[in-house]
Image (cartoon, helix red, strand yellow):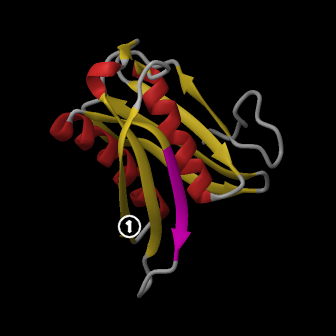
Amino acid sequence: MDGREPSGKQPGASGHRAVPHTADMQVEAWSPTAAGCIGEAVRAVVEGFADTSGAAVVGDHEYAITAEADEDLLVSVLEEVVYRMDADGEIPLDVEVGAIRSAGDGRGLSVRFRMADVGTVVAVGAVPKAVSLHDLQLRCGAGGWTCRVTLDV
């Protein structure tokens, strides 16, 4: 990220937070694993614009992704969140992300979203429209994995 650890980060712990940003939504997340960090980023993004406490699960969405770089995995998962809201009117209530072995030199993840109807959540912020590549980071350091991502709203 910018050399500073996210406030409240404990060694070996997972978490996320919103970061103040002038026009868009920016989040940071951390976890011992890259998959865990990406899952925390999904949770941070959803919490940034929706209160899902009254929503019910309407189904699951499972898929696998591969990419050349770790940052591309993060972008792909968050783009799926934005796409599912726009195309299917669904929002993730929960996410499970796991590492998979992929063919070739690429990296891979399995992703499972537990989805709710977007009409059953309460809006608490602007809905993201796209994932920005500006200031995108997903890194492994001494304390585990950290990421920062900005979404256009």
* Residue pictured at 78% horizontal, 51% vertical: 143
Residue 4: horizontal and vertical position, in percent? 71, 36
- Name the dominant secondary structure of the magenta segment: strand
Magenta run includes residue 96: yes
Tag 1: residue type? Ala
* Residue pictured at 36% horizontal, 23% vertical: 24
- Asked if residue 42 lies left or right of residue 61, the reply is right
* Residue pictured at 31% horizontal, 48% vertical: 80
Residue 115: horizontal and vertical position, in percent? 37, 40
Q: Is residue 108 above or below residue 3?
A: below
- Asked if residue 28 lies left or right of residue 7, the reply is left
Residue 51: horizontal and vertical position, in percent? 45, 18
Q: Mark 1 points at which residue?
A: 64
Magenta run includes residue 16: no
Q: Is residue 37 above or below residue 82?
A: below
- Asked if residue 75 lies left or right of residue 98, the reply is left
Residue 39: horizontal and vertical position, in percent? 53, 47
Image quadrant of residue 136? top left
